[in-house]
Image (cartoon, rainbow, N blue to C red):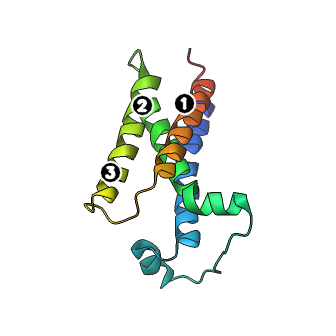
Amino acid sequence: MPVNVKKIIYFFNAFAPLAVGLIIYLKMKQSSYISQFVLQYIEVIEYVPKTILGVTARNWGCDFFWAYSLNSVLFYFLRPFKHKAFIAFGLTALLGVILELLQLYGALSGTFDVLDMIFEIIGAVISGIVSKIILKEG
């Protein structure tokens, strides 16, 4: 059975950002309910960012990487469709906006932040570009 290198690369392109987002969330947002639950079982050194890159990663890194991952997975499964890039981007952006609005109106725990939506959109755009390159789609 031949190994499809393109699919392996695409798998890592889609799921590595999901893992990176989870690590950022657990290590840098230690005040969340999920982090408190998980961190009671593992020891973690508290990270306090002192640079603009560190603050950006802490505040919006997980949003960027999770949107990147979601968009990559959607792009892959929407391959049969003609406008897969636009559909995947639209669904990713829509989900990001809906989740933020749910936070704004108190239906979902968390803090509403317009920058969350901006970083999710940036992640989706970059994911679409990388996905097209990996799959060599026009």
Q: Residue 101 carries which label?
A: 3
Q: Name the residue under label 1.
A: 128
Number of other residues with Cα within 10 Å of mark 3, as a class: few under 14, some 14 to 19, many 20 or more: some
Looking at the image, residue 60 lies above or below residue 12: below
In this rendering, position of residue 53 left or right of residue 112: right
Earlier in the chain: of badge 3 and badge 2, it is 2
Residue 30: where, in percent of width, then height?
52, 76
Q: Which amino acid does label 1 sit on?
A: Gly
Q: What element carries label 2?
A: helix
In this rendering, position of residue 9 left or right of residue 39: right
The reply to whether discs 1 and 2 touch (Cβ–Cβ < 8 Å) is: yes
In this rendering, position of residue 110 left or right of residue 6: left
Q: Which mark is residue 95?
A: none
Residue 52: where, in percent of width, then height?
71, 59
- Residue positioned 48% across, 77% down in the render: 31
Q: Is mark 3 on a helix, strand or loop?
A: helix
Quadrant where the image shows the C terminus? top right
Q: What residue type is labelled 3?
A: Leu
In three-dimensional space, the C-alpha distance between marks 3 and 1, rounded to whole angstroms, equals 24 Å
Q: Name the residue under label 2.
A: 88
Residue 104: where, in percent of width, then height?
33, 57
